[in-house]
Image: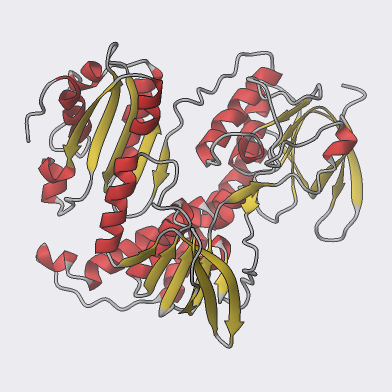
């Protein structure tokens, strides 16, 4: 240790980085985490997953009160929107959770090095303090790159969150008033979640998507059904359409739209434009070349099964490595990476990473889509509608379904997809079943509590090899 300041230095304190640092410290390694932000938790905790859920949850209550859902259940209210207070509870949630990570760092003796790191060699970084620009050098036996991702820019559409006209996901969380018309560029998870927040609070929302359907990468049935549900909720879709230009005129934006296949352009005016076409790895500024590292064509750092890079002693996890850009994937990789550094066996099963869209209803999936499963061989599929689930019916939540995809020969579950009010919670059961190599019969013969939304998973599993009871 004499030559090194730390056994492990983690660069970045997002879900992957802070978890890796805590796990490394728990395993007895002298650990530090370099983070230039004033708070820990990265994008997810500060301006991503957590604050967006606070707004989604609050907006659902408002929508239920404003649009008659509560009245159906005998509760008569006339809601008034207090947007400042709604933003306040979002900020409180973030403050509490970021402070919680700071506490965990102290508890586990992880040093928080406040500054932005860049490599000067394979085992040394220089840290630039965000506040005063001073620099200090830190040497570590192992360095984990966990710098996450940032918003992908769209050529011709310049984001300026301060003006609150053309914004990214960070700016969309901070709007001072409900826009009359919001245009969301991109029909993926982030655009649909934030678009649905402002739609519920009273905005007209138009979603422009380059592809022929929303939610790329998800199961085909789920994509079609989700489109129908969101349309019914009042979101307008312009599919197979690209945005080629955006001009801010006063307090409004004017967009130029063109058909993806070519054709005449049309103009669309909006109070707020949300650019959400994806995210890209944060590798610029790390001076990776000084460490002997390079990125692939997507700007990602390639790693092996153990999260080792091409340079001995340098590891990488989360959004900077290939795979889905999901906080829980980064967390699992952080734990596994720290365990591998400590000489244990850290493994992540990348075939069983659930994904969730936190709209209402929620949309969730794990494993293969039906389309991908069919490419690999013969499959059997079981479906069950939430309309026939007693708890969903009682709760006035009829939208959605559960779909179980199994191998036709072995009955092993290859994928589970669902749309339901609590799909994000339901999918954990499916992921665990798949982690243990379950068959659809295993799920079908597992007793599920009644009445619960999860019974729909049991019934969809029953539908794979036979017939469900309630349809």
Residue plotted at (91% across, 50% down)? 135
Residue 369 visible (yes or no): no
Residue 92, above or below 215: below
The quadrant of the rendering that contains the C terminus is: top left
Farthest top residue in view: 410
Give left or right: position of 268 versus 221.
right
Give left or right: position of 257 versus 342.
left
Instruction: Please tell me which residue lies in front, 280 or 317.
Output: 280
Total numbered badges shown on the rendered structure: 0
Residue plotted at (22% across, 78% down)? 78
Query: Residue 196 in the image: x percent, y percent?
Result: 37, 62
Instruction: Please tell me which residue lies in front, 233 or 138.
Output: 233
Residue 306, above or below 14: above
Residue plotted at (28% across, 67% down)? 63
Residue 353, above or below 72: above
The quadrant of the rendering that contains the N terminus is: top right
Residue 247 visible (yes or no): yes
- Quarter holding residue 7: top right
Farthest front residue in view: 263
Residue 411, above or below 250: above
Q: What scheme was used to colour the molecule?
A: secondary structure
Instruction: Please tell me which residue lies in front, 221 or 53.
Output: 221
Farthest bottom residue in view: 250
- Quarter holding residue 250: bottom right
Instruction: Please tell me which residue lies in front, 35 or 322.
Output: 322
Residue plotted at (39% across, 48% down)? 357
- Quarter holding residue 433: top left
Give left or right: position of 274 versus 131.
left
Query: Residue 252 in the image: x percent, y percent?
Result: 53, 83
Query: Residue 128 in the image: x percent, y percent?
Result: 85, 51
Query: Residue 114 in the image: x percent, y percent?
Result: 77, 49
């Amino acid at each position: 240790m004499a030559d090194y300041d730390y056994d492990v230095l983690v660069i970045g304190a997002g879900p992957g980085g802070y978890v890796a640092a805590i796990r490394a410290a728990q395993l007895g390694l002298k650990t530090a985490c370099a983070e230039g932000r004033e708070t820990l938790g990265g994008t997810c905790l500060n301006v991503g997953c957590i604050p967006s859920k606070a707004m989604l949850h609050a907006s659902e209550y408002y929508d239920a009160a404003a649009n008659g859902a509560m009245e159906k259940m005998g509760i008569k209210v006339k809601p008034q929107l207090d947007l400042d207070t709604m933003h306040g509870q979002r900020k409180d949630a973030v403050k509490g959770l970021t402070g919680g990570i700071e506490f965990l760092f102290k508890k586990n003796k992880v040093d928080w090095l406040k500054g932005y790191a860049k490599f000067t060699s394979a085992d040394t970084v220089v840290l630039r303090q965000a506040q005063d620009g001073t620099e200090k050098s830190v040497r570590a036996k192992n360095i984990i790159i966990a710098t996450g991702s940032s918003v992908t820019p769209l050529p011709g559409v310049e984001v300026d969150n301060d003006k609150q006209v053309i914004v990214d996901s960070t700016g969309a969380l901070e709007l001072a008033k409900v826009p009359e018309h919001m245009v969301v560029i991109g029909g993926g998870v982030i655009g649909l979640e934030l678009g649905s927040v402002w739609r519920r609070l009273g905005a007209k929302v138009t979603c422009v998507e380059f592809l022929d359907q929303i939610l790329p990468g998800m199961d085909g049935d789920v994509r079609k059904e989700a489109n129908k549900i969101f349309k019914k909720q009042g979101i307008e879709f312009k599919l197979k359409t690209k945005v080629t230009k955006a001009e801010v005129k006063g307090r409004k934006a004017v967009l130029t739209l063109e058909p993806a296949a070519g054709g005449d352009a049309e103009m669309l005016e909006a109070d707020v434009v949300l650019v959400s076409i994806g995210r890209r790895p944060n590798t610029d500024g790390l001076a990776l070349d000084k460490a002997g590292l390079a990125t692939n064509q997507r700007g990602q750092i390639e790693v092996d099964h153990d999260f080792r890079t091409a340079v001995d002693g340098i590891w990488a996890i989360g959004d900077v490595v290939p795979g889905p850009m999901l906080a829980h994937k980064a967390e699992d990789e952080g734990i596994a990476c720290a365990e591998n550094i400590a000489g244990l066996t850290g493994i992540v099963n990348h075939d069983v990473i659930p994904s969730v869209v936190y709209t209402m209803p929620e949309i969730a999936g794990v494993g293969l889509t039906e389309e991908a499963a069919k490419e690999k061989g013969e499959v059997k599929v079981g479906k069950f509608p939430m309309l026939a689930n007693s708890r969903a019916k009682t709760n006035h939540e009829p939208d959605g379904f559960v779909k179980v995809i199994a191998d036709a020969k072995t009955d092993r579950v290859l994928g589970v997809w669902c749309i339901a009010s609590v799909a994000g919670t339901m999918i954990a059961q499916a992921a665990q079943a798949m982690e243990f190599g379950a068959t659809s019969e295993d799920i079908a013969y597992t007793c599920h509590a009644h009445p619960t939304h999860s019974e729909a998973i049991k019934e969809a599993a029953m539908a794979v090899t036979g017939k469900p009871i309630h349809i």
